[in-house]
């Protein structure tokens, strides 16, 4: 069982065998699993007035009782803001930097005083240019220095951000501002997604359009980002340069302020060979749509739990405590 991974603790009860059948193992898990959920109506408007009884939770298909429920949760946010500074984004960087600064100002001057942001840039390498901080001005100063060049290590950026978020408390979010391409990553799409899932982080890509380089739009890259967003409970936005980027960030702030926290203690969950549990959060009202992560790492049929979930190399850098 892996320390620091939120691996499920389990007590095993043996039921006496009947009619010479092999014994049955029932897992009674004792630690809380939580998910952040966003609800919208058919017109795409946020819905923030639901109650616990409006939701249903299923773990590997088994109905679970909701033990913790918070509407418009005030859990502190840890946001990893990833800015693509590859050569293909060079012409858009000023707009992206200015809009990112306005986003950070709105996020950090309102809401929970414990909300923090860490700023990353990525081209052929990933750099954490500012550690987790609530100091808006220090982040704005770094955004003014953005310069575009070279390739795009998109998956590496998501992987490293997920790693740095993993041991932080509260809600965890990865915001990626990019044109959608990946040309220079050590880690694969699946490894990046797995690291985000291990961190319980929600991915929100902001794919800036139109792309002005000769290659045009990177549809494959956009689909990869949508795939990761959907599986962590986030969603993609596709703004054009200018006011649309500001609106994308404004909509994101509103969503982060209108989320539900749902927690449960997994009970009588059927185990599979995979340590990845399929998580479903459903709404009783068919007119509403919920976004939440699609699973978590826990116990498996072989008992390996989250410890056997991954074999990738752990990066050799860790986040320091956030700065004020």
Image: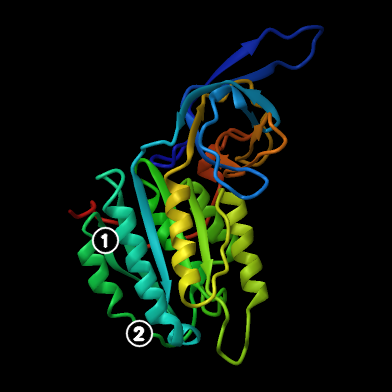
In the rendered view, tell whether residue 138 sits above or below residue 60.
below
Residue at the image position 47 percent from the left and 83 percent from the top? 89
List x then y, in percent, for residue 143: 30, 74
Q: CA distance from mark 1 to mark 2?
A: 19 Å
Q: Disc 1 or 2, which lies upstream in sequence? A: 1
Taking 313 as reference, is 59 left or right?
A: right
Q: How many marks?
A: 2
Residue 186 visible in the displayed image: no
Residue 164 in which image quadrant: bottom left
Residue at the image position 58 percent from the left and 80 percent from the top? 210
List x then y, in percent, for residue 270: 68, 27
In the rendered view, tell whether residue 167 sits above or below residue 31.
below
Pointer 1: what residue? 131
Residue 31 visible in the displayed image: yes
List x then y, in percent, for residue 269: 64, 26
In the rendered view, tell whether residue 12 sits above or below residue 126.
above
Provide the secondary structure element on which disc 2 rests: loop
- Residue farthest to the right? 19
Residue at the image position 29 percent from the left and 54 percent from the top? 108
Within-10-Å neighbours for mark 2: few <14, some 14–19, many 20+: some
Residue 222 in which image quadrant: bottom right
Within-10-Å neighbours for mark 1: few <14, some 14–19, many 20+: some
Pointer 2: what residue? 147
In-front residue for pair 255/58:
255
- Residue farthest to the left? 324
């Amino acid at each position: 069982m892996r320390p620091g991974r939120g691996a499920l603790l389990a007590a095993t009860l043996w039921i006496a065998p009947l009619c010479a059948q092999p014994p049955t193992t029932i897992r009674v898990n004792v630690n809380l699993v939580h998910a952040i959920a966003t609800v919208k109506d058919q017109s795409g408007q946020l819905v923030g007035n639901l109650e616990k009884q409006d939701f249903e939770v299923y773990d590997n298909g088994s109905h679970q009782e909701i033990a913790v429920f918070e509407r418009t949760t005030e859990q502190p946010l840890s946001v990893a803001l990833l800015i693509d500074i590859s050569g293909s984004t060079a012409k858009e960087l000023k707009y992206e930097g200015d809009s990112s600064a306005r986003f950070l100002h709105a996020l950090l001057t309102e809401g929970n005083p414990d909300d923090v942001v860490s700023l990353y840039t990525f081209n052929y390498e990933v750099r954490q240019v500012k550690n987790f901080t609530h100091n808006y001005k220090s982040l704005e100063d770094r955004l003014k220095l953005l310069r575009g060049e070279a390739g795009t290590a998109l998956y590496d950026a998501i992987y490293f951000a997920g790693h740095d978020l993993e041991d932080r408390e509260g809600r965890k979010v990865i915001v990626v501002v990019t044109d959608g391409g990946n040309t220079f990553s050590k880690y694969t799409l699946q490894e990046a997604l797995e690291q985000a899932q291990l961190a319980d982080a929600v991915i929100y890509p902001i794919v800036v359009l139109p792309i002005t380089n000769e290659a045009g739009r990177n549809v494959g890259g956009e689909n990869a980002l949508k795939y990761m967003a959907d599986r962590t409970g986030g969603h993609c936005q596709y703004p054009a340069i200018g006011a649309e980027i500001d609106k994308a960030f404004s909509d994101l702030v509103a969503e982060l302020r209108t989320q539900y926290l749902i927690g449960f203690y997994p009970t009588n969950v059927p185990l599979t060979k995979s340590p990845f549990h399929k998580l479903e959060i459903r709404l009783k009202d068919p007119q509403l749509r919920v976004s939440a992560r699609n699973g978590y790492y826990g116990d498996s049929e072989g008992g390996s739990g989250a410890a056997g979930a991954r074999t990738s190399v752990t990066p050799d850098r860790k986040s320091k405590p956030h700065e004020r």
